[in-house]
Image (cartoon, rainbow, N blue to C red):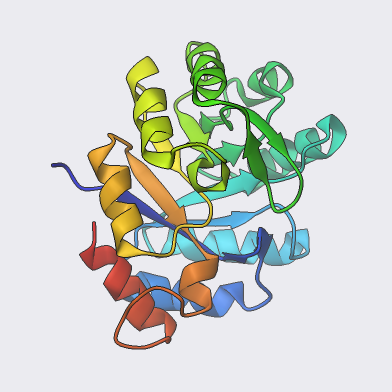
Amino acid sequence: MAGLDFIFMLTRHDRTVPDAIDHVATALEAGIRHIGFKDIGLPFGELRTVHRLIKAGGAASYLEVVSLDRVSEIASVRAAIDLGVDNLLGGTHVEDVLPLLRGAGIRYYPFAGHICGHPSILEGSIAEIADSADSIASRDGVHGLDLLAYRSRTNVEALIAAVCTVTDKPVLVAGSIERPEQITAIRRCGAAGLTIGTAALEGRFPASGPALRAQLDAITACL
């Protein structure tokens, strides 16, 4: 089976962590080449520094939108454009976002399904989420999908497989991933990548120790 793209998120509980700058260096030293952050948790000026360091280290950058109201989401999209990130993850207002991204050169992976709360929860049945995924992924300008599979109340493997079946665009599984068997399931079900933040930063992933470098090495070994 093909490997997965591991996107290391500089986040804890859906917020960019205060010491994100330090963690960028650790991630780059560990060979991580996909690094992201959220649109909340740090002042914009510090996010700009974080982004500059990610790009200077040769990694692809990701901003994930967690704001659910339209006004906040559009502000986050404008921030992503201003920063010049490579990839925009999340968000639910696809009709409003696509015109803003036109010509920006940013790859766009909005959420599939109905999202509520913070930290974000994915609601609905497998069929409803898959229908949403199909509709969203069919849009020009949508490059893939952000799927909060482990934050749903469905059969997670069946959900991932169903969403991957309805589109040939890449599906990235995000949220609450903290065990090797989850990574194995995500790969088996056909997803293109995954994001992990809190589990690595809090030392939850089974590894030789809780230090971030050990966590990142253990996650990478599962891919």
The residue lying toward the viewer, choosing from 70 and 184, is 184
Residue at image position (82%, 30%) is 70
* Image position of 176 (left or right of 189): right
Name the quadrant containing residue 167.
Answer: top left
Is residue 47 or residue 27 the one in the foreground?
A: 27
Query: Relative to residue 93, is residue 148 drawn left or right?
Result: left
Q: Give the quadrant of the N terminus.
A: top left
Q: Residue at x 27, y 64 (%)?
A: 220
Which residue sits at x=55%, y=65%? 10
162 in relation to 19, above or below: above
Residue 44 screen position, x and y as percent: 75, 59
- How many dots with numbers? 0
Tell me, yes or no, if residue 35 can be seen here: yes
Q: Residue furthest left?
A: 1
Q: Position of residue 129 (x, y in %)?
A: 54, 24
Tell me what residue is drawn at x 37 percent, y 76 percent: 215
Q: Position of residue 23 (x, y in %)?
A: 50, 76
Quadrant in which the C terminus is drawn: bottom left
Residue 182 at x, y = what percent? Answer: 35, 54
Q: Is residue 150 above or below residue 100?
A: below
**Is any part of residue 167 visible from this angle?**
no
The residue furthest right is 71
Vertical arrangement, residue 168 with respect to residue 37, above or below: above
As displayed, is residue 181 above or below residue 82? below
